[in-house]
């Protein structure tokens, strides 16, 4: 293993209404914007108005990088997920997309970075004004692996090795209280990266225990990880860690996410 790092995603400035309503909010206007706010070590380059981190000396394919893309349109409309509702595209707002350009490199490699995502929630039914809430922190550990056996996270061909992202905390069931009702903010990849139980070797490489949840990215490829966001009135129940993939990926596979974008 070359390096072990952390990506701290701080979703901040959640805007909610100061007015009181007797009924739960059923519709929200959601705005998410992200920038890299810090990184290490020296030698990693920040560019593109804070959206791109690049590192390493290219061996012919270019540097490795992590790129943030904010959603289009900027304001997403999403329905509150109540008990019994289907987790379909109407209940998922597009959030930031994280692209990992995983190229063979030498020299400096990213060890940690902070991705700060500002999430604004505007109640639209009932309609109301807003005020900020404390940040929600999402924590992911990142491991850039050496391209030689034995692989902590083998690729389908077992050579070269995949790089590793491990979910530590914060992506699911972050709560806030509004007008006497508790809501839960849930973030997850909707395509390109499957949240599933990783091999023990990958968990060990990331410095966490067996049974960790995350995804891996193949060497020499650009993996896009578009994140979706739900607002629910109850905790999302995930009976088995491997089924986390079903939250958003099944929708993307059915074309629901792309259809919603075309209809927006």
Image: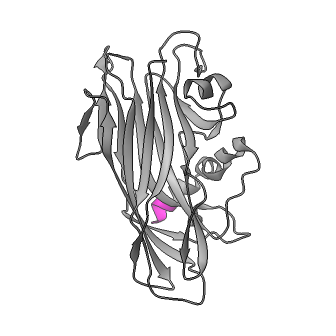
Residue drawn at x 51%, y 10% is 148
Q: Is residue 107 above or below residue 100?
A: above
If the image is split into quadrants, where does the C terminus sit? Answer: bottom left
In-front residue for pair 124/5? 5
Q: Is residue 148 left or right of residue 69?
A: right
Q: Residue furthest top?
A: 149
Residue drawn at x 65%, y 38% is 196
Determine which quarter of the picture holds residue 15.
bottom left
Q: What percent of the width, then of the height, locates residue 222?
A: 42, 31
* Magenta-drawn segment: 260-264
- Taken as a whole, is the magenta stretch helix, strand or loop? helix
Let me know if residue 213 is in the magenta part: no
State the colouring used for the structure image: one colour
Determine which quarter of the picture holds residue 18.
bottom left
Q: How many numbered marks appear?
A: 0
Q: Residue furthest right?
A: 239
Let me know if residue 261 is in the magenta part: yes
Q: Is residue 135 above or below residue 15?
A: above
Q: Is residue 14 above or below residue 142?
A: below
Residue drawn at x 31%, y 16% is 107
Q: Is residue 231 above or below residue 128?
A: above
């Amino acid at each position: 293993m070359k390096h072990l790092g952390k990506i701290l995603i701080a979703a901040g400035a959640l805007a909610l209404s100061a007015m009181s309503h007797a009924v739960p909010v059923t519709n929200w206007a959601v705005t998410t914007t992200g920038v890299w706010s810090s990184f290490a070590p020296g030698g990693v380059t920040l560019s593109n108005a804070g959206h791109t981190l690049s590192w390493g000396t290219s061996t012919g394919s270019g540097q490795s990088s992590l790129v943030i893309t904010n959603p289009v349109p900027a304001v997403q409309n999403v329905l509150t997920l109540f008990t019994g509702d289907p987790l379909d595209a109407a209940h998922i707002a597009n959030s930031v997309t994280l692209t990992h350009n995983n190229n063979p490199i030498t020299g400096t490699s990213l060890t940690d970075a902070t991705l700060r995502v500002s999430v604004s929630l505007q109640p639209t039914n009932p309609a109301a004004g807003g005020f900020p809430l404390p940040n929600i922190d999402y924590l992911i550990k990142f491991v850039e692996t050496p391209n030689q056996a034995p692989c902590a996270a083998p690729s389908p061909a077992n050579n070269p090795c995949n790089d590793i992202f491990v979910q530590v905390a914060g992506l699911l069931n972050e709560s806030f209280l509004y007008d006497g009702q508790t809501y839960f903010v849930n973030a997850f990849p909707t395509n390109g990266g499957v949240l599933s139980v990783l091999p023990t070797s990958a968990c060990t490489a990331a410095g966490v225990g067996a049974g960790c949840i995350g995804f891996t990215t193949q060497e020499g490829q650009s993996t896009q990880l578009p994140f979706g966001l739900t607002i629910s009135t109850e905790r999302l129940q995930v009976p088995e860690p491997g089924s986390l993939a079903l939250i958003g990926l099944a929708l993307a596979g059915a074309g629901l996410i792309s259809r919603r974008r075309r209809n927006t």
